[in-house]
Each structure stands twice: as structure tokens, then as C-alpha cells.
Amino acid sequence: MILLVGNWKMAPEKVEHAEKLAKDILTIAKKYKKNIQFVVCPSFGHLSIVAKHTKATLLLGAQGVASVVTPANTGLVSAPQLKGLGVQYTIVGHSESRARGDTNEMVVEQATRLIEKKIIPIVCIGEKTRDAQGWYLSEIKDQLHGLLTTISKTNFKNIVIAYEPIWAIGANAEREATPHECREMVIYIRKLISDVHGEKFATSVVIIYGGSVNEQNAKYFISDGTANGLLVGRVSLEPKRYELLAKSLSV
Ligand code: PGA
């Protein structure tokens, strides 16, 4: 089963457009549910309207959660609140939230809050730039370190890792990553997990890829890149292209 996660970020602006988009994605999800588990992650403001259209074929995700438990925290959304809305997955550690100040420690705390509520954290990791010496690998190692040392093996089973090289994300991406680069990183991430939890366990962890995924390159990140799924930003907002993407994964 391929995990296909749509990250809507702050789009669309209007609630009725979010509802229409959710309906369109549900129609696509019904067509391709045999091979693909669809998840949509709208912004907090649109969670409850989108929740009306999510069920087993299309699961509901959020884009963040508070790392703290104290209810007196203006502007934050707690894991129990997400749970109450029917959220089953939540993106944490996205490079855009890290750029706003989320640290590796906070990401571990956020993942912990989600696990406590049986919500699956999609933990994003990825390097800012690449260098010929391979220093970027230590950035990935640091991002995984806290998760591997703080979260128990039993709980780690319920974490999805999203490898998203920052240089490949969004409209200002330097370039697309190649499936080969994706494959190398999937192997490297599994190796880091294996060093702590053993090889057998490491092969069972769900690792998805994100960063400028589109209807042309998607299938290669799965086949050659060996990712177990995809985290899609811009294209997940365009039902026609998203359907082509889903179709390409199903042939
Ligand atoms: P993109 O975004 O597909 O628009 O590059 C991916 C992401 O930021 O998760």
C-alpha cells in the first residue's frame, strides 16, 4: 500500500473551496484505494469541514500540534483537540515549521504528544543543501537522533518518516531530487534506524518522500527511489493533476 499524503499548507483561502477540494480528492481516493491510502492535511481552520468528507478511503491529517500540554497556550492546538476532530495523521518537523523555530527537541515532543493520542506522526526530515563531502548526512542524523533515543521501539512503529530535502521543496526549489538520491537517503535513514532498533525493524518503518512531487516523477520515487509513499504539496491542490499522479502509481 502506498501512502499518499496531501499537504495543503495555508491553501485554499475559502472554506467552501476546501470542502470542494476534499470532495474531489475523495472521488479520486475511491478510484485508487486498492493500492493507495490517501491522507489529506488541511490547515487547522479547515479541519472540521474536511472531516465531513474523510473516512477510511481518505484519512484526515493535520499540519502540526503543540509540543506542550498546558492548556494555557495561546495560538496552539493540542493533540487531544486533533483527536476529537478525527485526525489520524499529523505532519511535524516540516522544514517550514522548523524555519519558524521548531527544534529537533520540540519535534520529538510533538511526536510524543501525538503518539499518546494514537495519532500517527509524519516526521519530516531533510537537509538544507547538499555538499560533495556528505556533511548533509549529519544533519539527517541529528534530526533522527532524538526520535530514536526518546521514543520507544514499540511507539516508533507508529511513526512515518518523510524525507524532504529542503532544496527540492516548493515553488522556489533549486531542482527536483532524482529517484536515485531518494533511494540513497531511504537506505541511509533505514541504516540509522537499524543501528538502534535492528535491521528487521528498520525495514518495516514507513518512509515517504516529499519535495516537488508531480504526476511525472511520482512513480519513480516509489519504484527506483524505494519510498513507501509521497508527501505532496502544490500538486495535491490540483485534482486533475493529483488524479494523474494517483493513476501513475496504480499501473
Ligand atoms: P511541494 O511541497 O510538493 O509543493 O514541493 C512539499 C511539502 O512541502 O511537503
Image: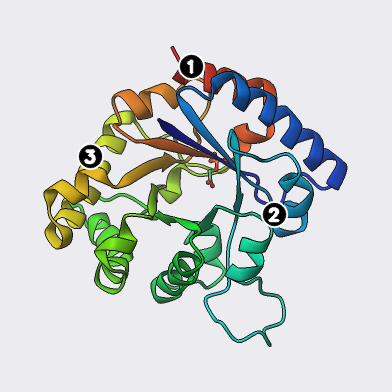
- Crowdedness near tag 2: few (<14), some (14–19) or many (≥20) residues, C-alpha within 10 Å: many
Residue 131 seen in render: yes
**Amino acid type, mark 2:** Ser
User: Taking the image as four quarters, which one is ligand 1 found in?
Assistant: top right
Residue 217's image quarter?
Answer: top left
Please give left or right for residue 155 compared with residue 50 in the image. left
- Crowdedness near tag 1: few (<14), some (14–19) or many (≥20) residues, C-alpha within 10 Å: some
**Amino acid type, mark 1:** Ser
- Ligand 1 contact, mark 2 (Cβ < 8 Å): no
As helix, strand or loop, the secondary structure at mark 2 comes to loop
- The Cα–Cα distance between marks 1 and 2, rounded to whole angstroms, is 27 Å
Q: Which residue is mark 3?
A: 184
Please give left or right for residue 25 compared with residue 117 in the image. right
Residue 12's place in the image compared with 152, above or below, is above
Q: Which residue is mark 1?
A: 248
**Amino acid type, mark 3:** Glu
Asked whether the beta carbons under mark 1 and mark 2 sit within 8 Å of each other, the answer is no
- Crowdedness near tag 3: few (<14), some (14–19) or many (≥20) residues, C-alpha within 10 Å: few
Q: Foreground mark, 3 or 1?
A: 1
Task: Tell which circle, 2 or 3, labels the residue nearer the N-terminal end.
Answer: 2
Residue 43 badge: 2
